[in-house]
Image (tube, grey):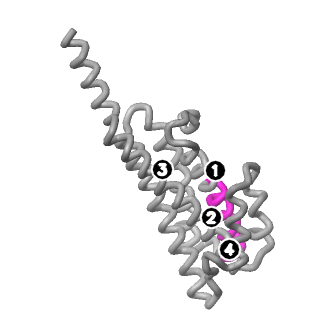
Amino acid sequence: MSRIVDGHGGYRDLEAFKMATIIYDGTVVFCGRFIDPRSRTTDQMIQAARSGQKNIAEGSMAAATSRKTEIKLTGVARASLGELLLDYEDFLRQRNLLTWDKDDEQALEIRRFAVRVDRSYKTYAPYIEQGTAEQAANTLICMIHQTMYLLRKLLEHLERRFLQDGGFTERLYKARREHRDK
């Protein structure tokens, strides 16, 4: 994942990957605490969280040979996290639990962690591991929104770069044409 710190797109995919990893770990704990481990929901949520994380990594690795694939996999990661977001919202609604407004004090507390350079799963663990079901789900919802924002910004950046520079195939064609023209 070294490409992600190349200075062209900032650290969006590194930050998104870091957050997606925390979300994946948090989802495993959340499902273990609040959802029947034998249920299809547990499997669906964990797989959506895993897909979000893995597709960010795979997209970043594919960037060297295919910007189109990088864009596609980043979009898949975003869609997977969107599915996971709906699962957490459904969880709260079906149990008549409160969904925090983005400006709720508890949500703002969670959102402030995003600027911490040293944040890790341990930063959020007290809310996920010791919090109520409502606190844990809302914490993960906040994190998913932040990660989806990072992925949206990353996709915008990748699309601009693709339109400006083309992809690997276009660069090879241009280099081959320039070589022939010499």
| Residue 135: x %, y % from top left | 71, 77
**Earlier residue among tags 4 and 2:** 4
Q: Residues within 10 Å of mark 4 (few under 14, many from 20)?
A: some
Q: Mark 1 or mark 3: which is in front?
A: 3
| Residue 180: x %, y % from top left | 20, 12
Label 2 with label 1: CB-CB less than 8 Å = no
Residue 143's mark? 2
Q: Residues within 10 Å of mark 1 (few under 14, many from 20)?
A: some
Seen at 37% across and 47% down, the residue is 159
Cα gap from disc 4 to disc 2, whole angstroms: 10 Å
Q: Residues within 10 Å of mark 3 (few under 14, many from 20)?
A: many
89 in the magenta segment: no
**Earlier residue among tags 2 and 3:** 2
Cα gap from disc 1 to disc 3, whole angstroms: 14 Å
31 in the magenta segment: yes
| Residue 19: x %, y % from top left | 63, 55
Residue holding disc 1:
18
Label 1 with label 4: CB-CB less than 8 Å = no
**Earlier residue among tags 4 and 3:** 4
Give the farthest residue toward the left: 181
Residue holding disc 4:
107
Label 2 with label 3: CB-CB less than 8 Å = no
**Earlier residue among tags 1 and 4:** 1
On-image quarter of the C terminus: top left
Q: Left or right: 69 with respect to 146?
A: left
Identified by mark 1, the residue type is: Lys
Identified by mark 3, the residue type is: Leu
Element class at badge 3: helix
Residue holding disc 3:
154
